[in-house]
Amino acid sequence: MLVKEIEMKKWGNSQGIRFGREELSVLGESNPENLKFEMVVTEGKIVLTPKNKKPETLDELFANYEGEPLGKEDKYEWGHLQGREII
């Protein structure tokens, strides 16, 4: 857990809060480039929850998949071998 006082500062025409390396390491994020948050504002509090959690299981990965499941009879033609495939 990390407790820290931070400041909101002008960022272009908006206000912004910047997260440093220390805060991101607590979140377990090494590449925050496209990190998204869910923001809940209630009772004078702002709560940010990271949304880019990587799936840990196949069930999590395909939780929102709406297509038809593929069976063993479904095959995909990948084309000719190029000689650089990792098997």
Image: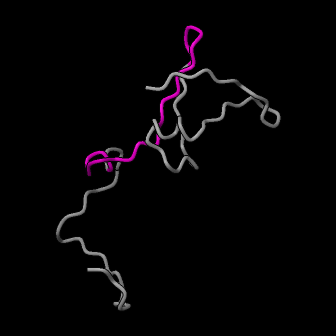
Residue 73 is left or right of residue 42, and the answer is left
In the image, farthest residue toward the left: 72
Position of residue 30 relative to residue 18, above or below, is below
Residue at left offset 41%, top offset 42%: 53
Position of residue 62 measured from the top left corner of the image (x, y, whole percent): 31, 50
> Is 27 part of what is drawn in magenta?
no
Residue at left offset 54%, top offset 43%: 35
Position of residue 46 measured from the top left corner of the image (x, y, whole percent): 57, 19
In the image, farthest residue toward the right: 13
Position of residue 69 relative to residue 16, above or below, is below
User: Is residue 49 or residue 3 the one in the foreground?
Assistant: 3
Q: How is the image coloured?
A: one colour
Position of residue 83 measured from the top left corner of the image (x, y, whole percent): 35, 91
Position of residue 37 relative to residue 39, above or below, is below
Position of residue 48 measured from the top left corner of the image (x, y, whole percent): 52, 27
Residue at left offset 26%, top offset 49%: 57
Q: Which residues are magenta?
A: 41-61
- Location of the N terminus by quadrant is top left
- Location of the C terminus by quadrant is bottom left
Position of residue 78 relative to residue 23, above or below, is below
Residue at left offset 34%, top offset 49%: 66
User: Is residue 73 or residue 12 the one in the foreground?
Assistant: 12
User: Is residue 26 or residue 32 the one in the foreground?
Assistant: 26
